[in-house]
Image (spheres, rainbow, N blue to C red):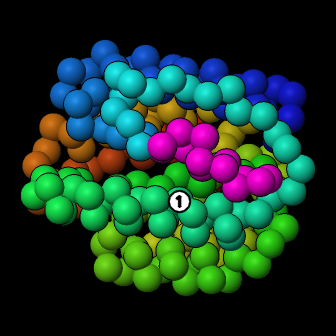
């Protein structure tokens, strides 16, 4: 992802932070971590919204998507273990994959990890394809919910939807999180996705 797409992604991350930090409850309950691939790097370990400084993401070479997904699931499990040990209730986490390409590594084991984690309700996995993303692979990765295609470069609308959704979830109790209805990302003037 180069040029305008990465610029819009970076701008969307900044807007996402601003929207979440403006919500007192969400700013205390939402935590963010960012894993990039090419090479796989944790550019932002889990932190609350108020301490989150959106990184300046840059494109870099290969797309080891399978390894990045595995790393994301690994650090997510570590975070959940920390909460369990401290006796802190938590919401079912979300994993968002945003890509404009195809994996350059073996990704089948990552797909199995996603399906297993979704089946056990360990997390919810969302796949978003940009431009020429390989939707065959994204469909194989995301069986619980259909991958979405970003309309143009509407990252700002994607992150607006994400922050609104997380604000709604943060107002529920962790036990009720499955009952929170999320807005349709394909509907309305701010609809950012196509199926």
- Against 166, is 139 above or below? below
Q: Position of residue 125 (x, y in %)?
A: 47, 62
**What residue would you read off at disc 1?**
72
Q: Which residues are magenta?
A: 33-45
Determine the image quadrant of residue 147: bottom right
Asked if residue 164 shows in the view, the reply is no
Q: Position of residue 138 (x, y in %)?
A: 67, 67
In which quadrant is the C terminus drawn? bottom right
Q: Residue at x 22, y 60 (%)?
A: 178
Compare residues 16 and 76 and report the one nearer the observer: 76
Q: Residue at x 10, y 58 (%)?
A: 87
- Against 145, is 174 above or below? above
Q: Residues within 10 Å of mark 1 (few under 14, many from 20)?
A: many
Q: Residue at x 86, y 57 (%)?
A: 62
Compare residues 99 and 188 and report the one nearer the observer: 99
Q: Is residue 151 magenta?
A: no
């Amino acid at each position: 992802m180069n040029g305008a797409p990465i610029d819009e992604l970076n701008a969307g991350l900044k807007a996402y932070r601003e929207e979440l930090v403006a919500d007192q409850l969400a700013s205390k309950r939402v935590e963010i971590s960012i894993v990039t691939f090419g090479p796989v790097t944790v550019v932002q370990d889990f932190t609350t919204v108020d301490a989150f400084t959106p990184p300046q993401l840059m494109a870099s070479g290969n797309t080891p998507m399978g390894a990045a997904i595995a790393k994301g699931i690994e650090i997510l499990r570590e975070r959940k273990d920390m909460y369990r040990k401290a006796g802190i209730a938590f919401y079912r986490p979300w994993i968002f994959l945003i890509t404009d390409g195809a994996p350059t590594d073996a990704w089948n084991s990552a797909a199995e990890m996603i399906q297993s984690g979704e089946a056990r309700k360990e997390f919810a996995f969302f796949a978003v394809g940009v431009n020429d993303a390989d939707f065959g692979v994204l469909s194989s990765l995301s069986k619980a919910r259909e991958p979405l295609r970003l309309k143009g470069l509407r990252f700002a609308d994607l992150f607006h939807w994400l922050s609104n959704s997380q604000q709604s979830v943060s107002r529920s109790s962790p036990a009720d999180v499955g009952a929170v209805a999320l807005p349709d990302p394909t509907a309305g003037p701010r609809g950012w996705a196509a199926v």
